[in-house]
Image (spheres, rainbow, N blue to C red):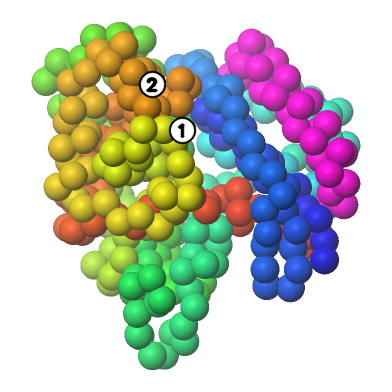
Amino acid sequence: MTRVAAIDCGTNSVRLLIADLDGGVLTDVERRMEIVRLGQGVDRTGRLAPEALERTFAAMRGYADLVARHGASAVRVVATSATRDAANREDFVTGVREIFGVEPEVITGSEEAELSFTGATRDLVRLSPETGLPTPDGTRPPYLVFDIGGGSTEFVLGTTHVEAAISVDIGCVRLTERHLRGSVAPPSAEVVEAITADIDDALDRVAEKIPVERALTLVGLAGSVTTVAGIALDLPEYDPGKIHHSRIPANRAHDISRRLLGMTHEERAAIGVMHPGRVDVIGAGSLILDRILRRYGFDEVVVSEHDILDGIAWLASKP
């Protein structure tokens, strides 16, 4: 058995998973998430803001203490969209090296997609690809896995391994900063149309790269999707155990996206499952989910709490 620590530093949040890896089984020891908004302004400036870096480093210092306390023998730190887009990403790399004593990996969109697929499907893929029979929870491969991040969204098609993948620059933070600009009032119809146009352009590029029509199950990852799922399930507060592997009908997702976009900042903040750090970006995130379901014709989305963080943990013990 190996105790591993995985840190995922995205555009909106920084997350920690400490887990025991024993053969083919990954057992959680501790999961943490903090909204740090590392990607603040990156779409506009091309640089990581000093205050965003400090928020991120402060969260990571706390994570480093937990890693030491739990005695993790292998640590892997991965950074995604905001960091790879930033001209001053060496500032991030240097800070992380000082905190954890390991070199962070600023991964490509394709690498991010593969890690997301691994994390999301390890507990879905429990059958021989040759049989085509349903998995125990009723899902059927091939899977189209999508991970809505702050700066980008990754799409992966596969059964037991990645067959095709692409990362596109539509994320809940990027689209919010580009179109909503800090507004606390519901966006106008014109603004929603502009966001939709950005999303649809990206989804056209996805369809050119990935044969999405082959997919039999749509699997959605990350905070925008899990928050919509929590609302769809009428949960009074966020409950990952009830959200994991829930199946949200497309018409329910469409209705929730429409309602979220029509709410004020204060109304969204009052939703029980809503993390405070997602209040301002959930409208754009839910619209990405809405357009994926419409564009590719799925009747439902299977929601996974396991994602890139779990993929990082699976590979953390490898050189």
Q: Which residue is mark 2?
A: 279
Residue at 31 percent of width and 66 percent of height:
217
| Chain part drawn in magenta | 46-74
**Relative image position of residue 230 (x, y in whole percent):** 35, 40
Q: Secondary structure at mark 2?
A: loop
Within the magenta stretch, is there residue 82?
no
Which quarter of the image is occupied by the C terminus?
bottom right
Q: Please identify the quarter of the rendering in which residue 298 is found.
A: bottom left
**Circle 1 residue:** 151
Whether residue 181 is situated above or below residue 160 in the rendered picture: above
Identify whether 159 is placed above or below 98: below
* Quarter of the figure with residue 104: top right
Residue 63 magenta-highlighted: yes
Q: Residue at x 78, y 25 (%)?
A: 61
- Gap between marks 1 and 2 measured at Cα: 16 Å
Residue 244, label in figure: none
Image spot of residue 280 (x, y percent): 37, 19
* Quarter location, residue 290: top left
